[in-house]
Amino acid sequence: MISVFLNRLQSGFLLFETQHGLVRVELSLWQRIYLLWTFRNFRQLSIPLLNLRQRTLVNALFRNNAKVVSHSHNALPVIGVVENFVPPTVRIDASPAPLSGQDSGIQASRPPLRFAYPVYPDVRARGVVSLTAGLSSDGAVRTVRVVSGNRALAAAAVRAVHQWRYRPYLKDGQPVATETNIVISFFSDDAISMSFPPGLPAIH
């Protein structure tokens, strides 16, 4: 029991049970300590059972650090599962500068509401693909641009991302077009990690 606790303290993560599958969130040490206390008596909790501080932290973690869980994952370090999680609508209070080459798209990276896994013919292929997707105001994927990555893996990633759907972003109470960054890591034929960083390194 002590070894399980230490494992979760050192490398534990949080899982979100969403409508379209499990989403994993990596944690800092203090976040692991706080959530170990939160989930001390329960393996699974829903948002209504959390207090305001806990809800604020959980929503922020999902928005900034979420990764889609592959078909198989090690359940041992899981600190807890947030049941029936629905990503909150995010309101943009400031007006970021438009990105070049996009018609007034606002940079607002976040996990998708609905996603599909990339399907690629050569399961031996490994690598990391970085993408930027242009989203319409209703959250549909309009364009996908490959920033870097293996050509075959990038093609599979683009096909998958075109099937994704996002929760619309609101600015001044109105849905707006946005851009979002996506990084897909192909580790093996049954392990794919997805993350959504606020920025991507420039390719020269």
Image: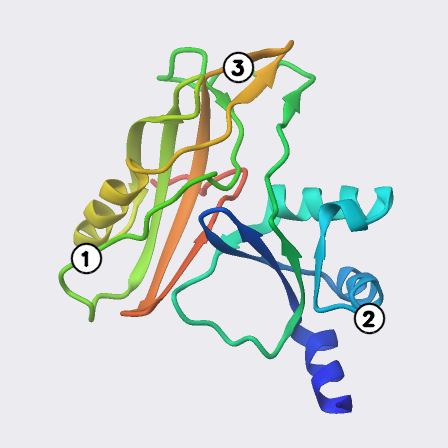
Query: SS at mark 3?
Result: strand
Residue identifier under label 2? 40
The mark closer to the camera, 2 or 3, is: 2
Give the quadrant of residue 91.
top right
Q: What's the colour scheme? A: rainbow
Between 85 and 152, the residue placed more toward the observer is 85
Residue at 77 percent of width and 60 percent of height:
31
Q: Residue at x 60, y 38 (%)?
A: 87
**Closer to the camera in the image, 17 or 182:** 17
* Residue behind mark 3: 175
Q: Amino acid at mark 1?
A: Tyr
Q: Residues within 10 Å of mark 2 (few under 14, many from 20)?
A: few
Q: Amino acid at mark 3?
A: Pro
Q: Which kind of residue does numbered mark 2 sit on?
A: Arg
Quadrant (top left, top right, bottom left, bottom right) of the N terminus: bottom right
The residue to which callout 1 is attached is: 120
Comes first in the chain, label 2 or label 3: 2
Quadrant containing the C terminus is top left
Q: Whole-Å distance between the Cαs marked 2 and 1?
A: 41 Å
Kind of element beneath mark 2: loop
Q: Is residue 74 left or right of residue 139?
A: right
* Secondary structure state at the residue bearing disc 1: loop
Above or below: residue 170 compared with residue 112: above
Which of labels 1 and 3 is toward the front? 3
Q: Which residue is at 78% across, 90% downward?
A: 2
| Residue 156 or residue 166, whichever sits in front | 166
Rendered location of residue 132, percent (x, y): 38, 34
